[in-house]
Image (spheres, rainbow, N blue to C red):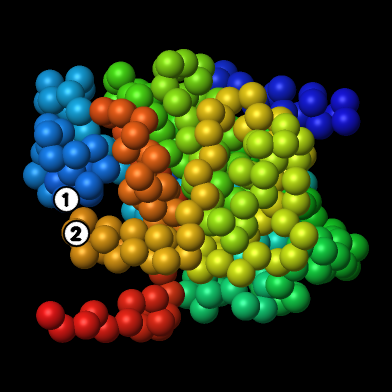
Amino acid sequence: IEGIKEASSSVSIEGIKEAADRIRPFVHRTPLLRCSFLENSILGAAALVGGGGAAVNGSADEREGPGVFFKCENLQKVGAFKIRGACNAVSLLKQENPETAAVVTHSSGNHAQALALAARLHGLRALVVMPKDSPKVKVAAVEGYGGEITFCEPNQQAREDTADLLLKKHGGTFIHPYDDTRVVCGQGTVGLEIAQDLKGLDAVVIPVGGGGLLSGTAVAIKALTPTTRVIAAEPVNADDAKRSFEAGEKKLNEAPPQTVADGLKTNLGDVTWPLIRQTVDEVISVSESEILSALRLVMERMKLVIEPSAAVGVAACLRPEFAERGYKRVCVVLCGGNLELDRCALFFPPLKSV
């Protein structure tokens, strides 16, 4: 327990700022976009809006007035925020142990892609464990970045056991997809950019799976704009964060969650949970139908490709209880855009004609 406390306490705004400097050559500073339809749906028609899909340009309205701002990590390298944490972890690893030849991880896709690319950029081999039901688009991307994939059964124990076997067979260093302070600091650069680009935010809404993005972003937001509320969003079918938050102690998903948001199936970590408990104000859970409805709205109205995990935060903002909070300036993190296009027919059945 003491080790866990020490690890989580090492995630700080200073560490996040250092991570930002470290990863700057390797990642994009992603844009903030607005959408009049979604803005009105979330805040109400009286909200001041920019044009649908308009980028933030520093106008007085955007600096101070009402609005909903979407942090587009779906436009990040590898199509998700994960490249931030992976690059920070691999860069630090190379500094501390120049003789390292390989990195090992387990991931349903986005961290796997990110680590494969980060390893290639730093001249390392990437050995990746992926559940056998991982989206094909993510498997293909990992292979494209040079990752060497070993498939496993779709549960946490199988992931960990298979990664251990690879470490014993090949050596290398394990980099956890979220429960690693180096990774958390890298993901926290999302919050750093939000706080630098947007002033006077009432709330930031962030999807949560294992909690790397949520905990890192929350640490940055609370350090730089402490009055801003940090709200986590997760599928009701994978609601370990909500149950943990309500109980005041970490609660696990007892069975593999069945949710379209494949990136949010993992349980909170030993590093991420204490940070979340300290910095997050609320957790909102959403249904599968709400996730798919939000996914469709973003794709149709903003013309952005996002994956279901990214739609979870949008779905949370569209819930009636969110509107009751009276927020006027909100930022929603679109965490990724690796959508399996072959499954769109299942996600979006034909609309009934009027």
Secondary structure at badge 2 equals helix
Tag shown at residue 66: none
Outermost residue on the left side: it is 51
Residue at (57, 19) in percent of width and height: 14
Residue at (42, 22) in percent of width and height: 228
Location of residue 247 with respect to 133 vertically, above or below: above
Question: Badge 1: few (under 14), some or many (20 or more) residues near its Cα, within 10 Å?
Answer: some
Tag shown at residue 37: 1
Q: Disc 2 designates what residue?
A: 301
On the rendered structure, is 350 left or right of 12? Answer: left
On the rendered structure, is 11 left or right of 315? Answer: right
Location of residue 133 with respect to 277 vertically, above or below: below
- Nearer the camera: disc 2 or disc 1: 1
Position in image of residue 165 (x %, y %): 87, 67
Q: Quadrant of the N terminus?
A: top right
Secondary structure at badge 1 equals helix
